[in-house]
Image (tube, helix red, strand yellow):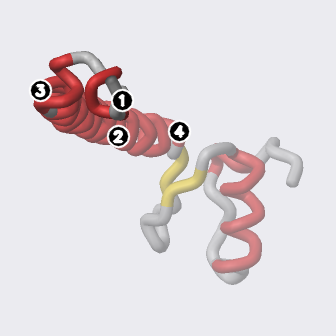
């Protein structure tokens, strides 16, 4: 008797049931992973935005721009508003 390639394979492989189940699992896995990645991206983006906003603690009274530290604030004030008097909170700060 001559053995063909299909007779060597298991009955599941011959009928295609194994591939269909794996294909369905693959699609479910991809959908689950896509949802997980979207949730992580959404959460991560929000945290960065909140952290950046919290870091801007100094606000220029003239132009209302925000700066993260007094040194940057003084440099901004001296370059952008040279004719305005220096605010009292920037008196002792070295730029």
Indicate which label's residue lies in the foreground, 3 or 2: 3
Q: Secondary structure at mark 4?
A: helix
User: CA gap, disc 4 to disc 2?
Assistant: 21 Å
Q: Please name the residue that numbered disc 4 is placed on.
A: 55
Residue under the image location 63 percent in, 75 percent down:
84
Distance from disc 2 to disc 1, alpha carbons, whole Å, reads 58 Å
Query: Residue farthest to the right?
Result: 94
Check if mark 3's residue and mark 1's residue have beta carbons within 8 Å.
no
First in sequence: mark 4 vs mark 2: 2
Mark 3–mark 1 Cα distance, whole angstroms, equals: 26 Å
35 with respect to 84 (left or right) = left
Residue 38: which quarter of the image? top left
Q: CA distance from mark 3 to mark 2?
A: 36 Å
Which residue is denoted by mark 3 in the rendering? 17
Q: Nearer the viewer, mark 1 or mark 4?
A: 1
Name the quadrant of the C terminus. Answer: bottom right
Residue 34: image location, x then y, percent: 26, 39
* Crowding near the residue tagged with mark 1, few <14, some 14–19, many ≥20 C-alpha atoms within 10 Å: few
Q: Which numbered disc, 3 or 4, marks the residue closer to the eye?
A: 3
Residue that label 1 marks: 2
Which residue is the site of mark 2?
Answer: 41
At label 2, counting other C-alpha atoms closer than 10 Å, the crowd grade (few under 14, some 14-19, many 20 or more) is few
């Amino acid at each position: 008797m001559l053995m063909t390639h299909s007779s060597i394979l298991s009955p599941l492989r011959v009928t295609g049931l194994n591939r269909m189940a794996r294909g369905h699992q693959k699609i479910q896995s991809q959908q689950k992973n896509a949802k997980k990645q979207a949730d992580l991206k959404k959460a991560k983006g929000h945290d960065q935005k909140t952290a950046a906003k919290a870091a801007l603690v100094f606000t220029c009274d003239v132009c209302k721009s925000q700066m993260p530290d007094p040194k940057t604030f003084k440099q901004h004030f001296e370059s952008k508003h040279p004719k305005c008097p220096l605010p009292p909170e920037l008196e002792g700060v070295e730029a």
